[in-house]
Amino acid sequence: MTAPARETAFDPGAAAARATDAILRDTLHGPHRGVVVDSPPGAGKSTLVVRAALELAAAGRPLMVIAQTNAQVDDLVVRLAEKNPELPVGRLHSSDADPYDKALDDLPNVRKSAKAADLAGLDVVLSTAAKWAHVKTDEPWRHAIVDEAYQMRSDALLAVAGLFERALFVGDPGQLDPFSIVGSEQWAGLSYDPSASAVTTLLAHNPELPQHRLPVSWRLPASAAPLVSDAFYPYTPFRSGTAAGDRRLTFAVASDGSAPDRVIDEAAASGWGLLELPARYTPRTDPEAVRALAAVVRRLLERGGAATSERSPDPAPLTADRIAVGTAHRDQAAAVRAALADLGITDVTVDTANRLQGREFDVTVVLHPLSGRPDATAFHLETGRLCVLTSRHRHACIVICRAGVSELLDDHPSTEPVQLGVTVKFPDGWEASHAVLARLREHRVGWRP
Amino acid sequence: MSLIATLARLEAVRAGQAQPAATVRHRHLSERPLVFVPLTTAGEAGAPLGALVGTDRHAPRLLAVPQPRDRDLRFAFLAELADVVLPYIDSHASAVEAAERTETDPESGKRVKVEVELCADAPQLIVPSRAGIDFVRLLGRSMRFRRTAEQDPQAPHPAPPRVPLLGRWLTHFGERARVPGSSLLLALTDVLARHWTTGQSSLEDQHLGALLAWIDPPEGASGAQAALRAELARGADGQLECPPAGPATDPAFDNKLLAPAIERYDRARTALAAAEDGLQADARLGALTAAEREIRALVERCALPTWEKVWDGLDLLRALPEGAHVEERWTRDRWSFTGHRDRVLAGEPPQPRRDDAVTAANKLAAREREQARLEAQEALDDPLVMAGRRLAGEAFAGEVTDVVMAYGEGRRPSPRPLVTVRTDDLPHLGERARVYRSLDGRPQSAEFVAHEEGDGAEGTLIVLRILDKMGRGKEPAAGSVPDKGDRVCFTLFEHEQRGGAKLPEPEQTPWTHGGPPDEESAPEAPDPVTEEDVL
C-alpha cells in the first residue's frame, strides 16, 4: 500500500507499512503465542488479515481463520482468492440453508463443507467462531487469525482456543462491545468474565503479549479522523491517510435553500453536518426525525453527487449503494426503510450500529442515539455505538438530532455501578458524546419541519 | 421498556388500577411453597434481625436475633432457620420418579440413555422482593464454608451442625434464581410485575405494598392513592403503616423502636452476667426474657404485614391459569434440584466462591438459552404477550387468503406451498427472513417471499413459503399446511433454542483463559476468621 508522496513530516503510507511489518514479524517469528492488533476504523484491518493469512500459508503453517459473522468470513474468502487465486482455501459453513455467499461457488480453489474433516489439509480454513466451536480435533492448527476479536465474547474464544497453538487477534477496540441478553454482573471483575471481550480476557491472562496498532485510517477523511481519534481513541490516536484536499464531494444540482440541502452542502464542505430538529420528547421511531432522514437521503440522490478521492482521478457518482443510514435501534431502521420506500428509494443501506460495523460508505446519515430521549441509558451512551455511527464514511457524515441532547447529557451523568476489578473504559460514552456534539454544533443547520 | 408496556402503564394511570400484562401465569407456583420474609440489621451486611418463615399462612414461624451483632445468637438463628428449611427441602428429596437422561459413556464416549431418579416435586422458596433474593444468596455465602465442630474440632467458632448444609442449599436457590424462567426461588414483586402493569415506575414496583395497592386497590381508592399510602402513611407513633418488605427495615423503626429495645436487652444481659446469687439471677433472667420477647414482638410487627401481603399476592397469582409451557420449565427446576440433592448426597464440597472460566461460560450460555426460550414460550402461551411482540414487529397474525401448491427444486421435489397471509401487523421482515408458527406445539418454519399488492382491503398481504413439517410424501401431510380462511400467527423469533457448542472441560481450560484452574485450591478452605467474626 503506497500513498502518494507528500511534503508533510508524516507519511501515512510509510507509517502504516512500518506497523504492518512489525505485526507480521511478531506473528511469523515472534516468541509469543499471541499478537494483538488494535485497528481504528478503516485502517486496513481486512487487508492486514489477508496479508497475514497469505504469508502464514506461504510459510507452510496450517491456518484457521475465525471471524464473527458469515458475511465477514465470505468477505475474507473472496479477498484471499483475489490476492492469490491458486491458494487452496476451505470455507467451513453451517448446515443451514444458504450457509455462505453464492459468489464463493465461482472460486475454483475454494472448497466448501459443513464438516471440518472434508477440509483437512487445506492451507487456510475459514469459518465463524460459532461454527468452529463445534469442531473437534486431535491435532490443533499451528496458527489462527481471530478477526473482529473485540466483538468476540470471551466465552466464544474459550470454545475455540483449544483448536490452535498460536494466534493473531485483530480488531477495533472502539466499536461496540459484545453483549449478553442476561445479566452477568456475577462475573464482573473476573479475568475470564465470559461476557467480556475476547481480547480483554486474553490480555488479562497474558499481559506480556505484544500489542500493535495500525496508525492510519484510510477510510476516514482528514475532516473526520481527528474528531473520531480524539473522542473515541484518546490514548491511541491515529491519523487520516489522506490530506484535507484529497477528497471532494460536489453536487450537480444547486441547493434549493431547504434545510436538508443546506446541511448536505455543509457536510460536503466540512465533512460534518448536524440537522437539528426542535427539542421534543418522542417515541423511538420519531416520525419527524425519520422523515428528515428520508428527506436528506432523497436530496443526496436527487442532486447528483460526485465523490472525488485518491482512489481515482475521475469523480465517482454518489449512488444509493454508497450511502448508508445508521440508527441505534432496529425499529428505527425499519421505520426509516419504510419512509424511504415511500419515496421510492430501496437500495440505500439502512441498519443499526451493530450491523454497520466493519462497513464503509461515501456518505452516512445518522439518527443520533439520544435524539428525542428523556433519559440517557447505558445502551444509548455506549461509546462504541456512536463511534460506529460516526466512522463509516469516506466523505461526509450527516447527523439528525433533536435539540437538547447536551442538556440531557448533563442531566444524566454516568451512573453505572463501579465493579471491583473491572478496568474503567475510557473515554466513557458521556464524555465522547459531548465531544462529538461540540464538534457537530459547528456545522449545525436548524430545521422546523 | 416495550411499547405495549408503556401503553399499559399509561392505561393503568388513567384507570387508577394495574392492567393485566398476561392472561396466564408464567411461573410455576408450588402447592405448598415456603414463604421466607427475612429482616436484616442496618449497618452490617448479612446480620439477620429475624424472619417469618413457613408453609402455612396461618402459622408462620417467628425467628428473631435479639442482639444481631452477637455471633452465637446469629448461629442460633441460622440453626433454627435450618430446622425449618431443611426438613421442607428433605420432604421433596425422597419422592422420586424414574427418568432418562442422556450421558456420555466414559468408556465408549458415546451418548447413551441412563435411568436416573428425578424428584417428583421440588421445593419452592418465595421471598417478598428482589432484595430478598440477594439476602438469600448472602446467607448462603456466609454459611456454606463454615465448619461444624464435627468437621473441624479445632475451629474457634464452630457452626451448628446443619448450618453449612443450609448455606449450600440457599446458594443453590440463589444461583438458580438467576436462570430466566426458573421458579425454585421467586421474588414476589418480580412475579407480580410480570403479570400486571402498574401506573408507577418499575423501580417503585419493587415495593410490595405499593405494587399490591395498584393491582388490588382497596374499595373507593385509586391505585395511585393506595400506593402512595402504602409507601408513606405513618401512624401516630411515626411508624410506617405498611412496613417495607425488607430485608432492610425503616430507619424510624430502627431508631425509635428497635435500637432502644436492643439496648434494654443488652443491659438485661449484662445485669444477668453480673448477678451474684441464684435468686438475683432468676429475677434478672426474667428481665432478659422480657427484653427478648419485646424484640421478638417488634420483629413480628415489622414482618407480619409483609407475610400477609406475600400470601395475598400468591392468591392473586393462583387465580390465573398456568401457562402451557410452565410445567416444562418447572421440570427443569426439578432436574436442577435433583442434581444438587445428588451432589450433596455424594459428599461433594460446597459450591466454590468463584466460578472457574468454563463453569462461568457454561452458566452464561445456559441462561441466554433459557432467556430466549422463556421469551418465546411466554409469547406462545399468552396472546397478550404475543400482542406485544406483534406490536414490536416481531410477529404477525392474520388470515390466510390464498394457498398455492408449489414444489422445491431438487431430485425429489418436496412440497413448498406458498401461503398468503393478510395481516394488520407490521412485521420487520427482511429478505428471505425465516418465520415460525406453532403446529401442534412444534415449530413449523416458513420463508418470507414477498409483500403483495393489496386488493384494496385493509392490511398488508404477506406471501410465505412453508418449508418443513409436511411429512415425507409428495403431498403435504393432512393439516400441515394452513387452509384458506385459517387464522395463523407467525413469529420472527425461533420457538426452540439450539444447544450451544460444548466447552472444554475445566481441566482443559486453554492458555487464553489462564489455563486449568489450580488443583490445590480445591476443595476450598473455610473463610478465615477475622476480627469482625469475634466482635
Image (spheres, helix red, strand yellow):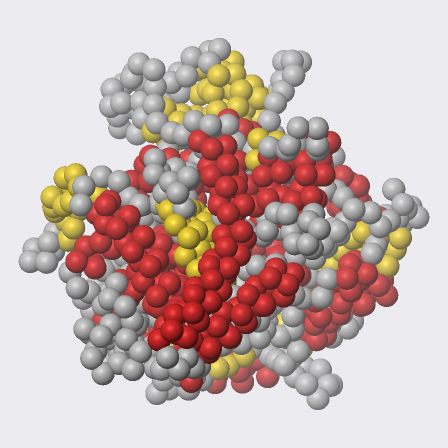
Task: Depth check: give the residue in front, B249 or A95.
Answer: B249
Task: Depth check: give the residue in front, A238 or B212.
Answer: B212
Write the residue at 75% across / 70% down.
A435
Residue at far right of view: A257
Name the spot of residue B434 as percent of width and height, x first.
45, 35
Horizontal relation, residue B234 to residue A164: left or right: right
Image quadrant where one finds the N terminus of chain B: top right
Horizontal relation, residue A334 to residue B486: left or right: right
Name the spot of residue B513 as percent of width and height, x first.
35, 73
Write the residue at 28% across / 48% down.
B88
Task: Depth check: give the residue in front, B138 or B437.
Answer: B138
Q: Is residue A335 visible?
A: no
Horizontal relation, residue B396 to residue A30: left or right: right
Q: Is residue B525 visible?
A: yes
Name the spot of residue B35 as percent of width and height, x first.
41, 46
Residue at far front of view: B279
Image quadrant where one finds the C terminus of chain B: bottom left
Q: Is B226 rendered above or below residue B504? A: above
- How many numbered markers are drawn? 0
Q: Is B328 rendered above or below residue B39? A: above
Name the spot of residue A315 as percent of width and height, x first.
73, 58
Write the residue at 54% across / 85% down.
A18
Quadrant for residue A216, please give it: bottom right
Residue at far top of view: B485
Write the residue at 55% across / 65% down.
B261
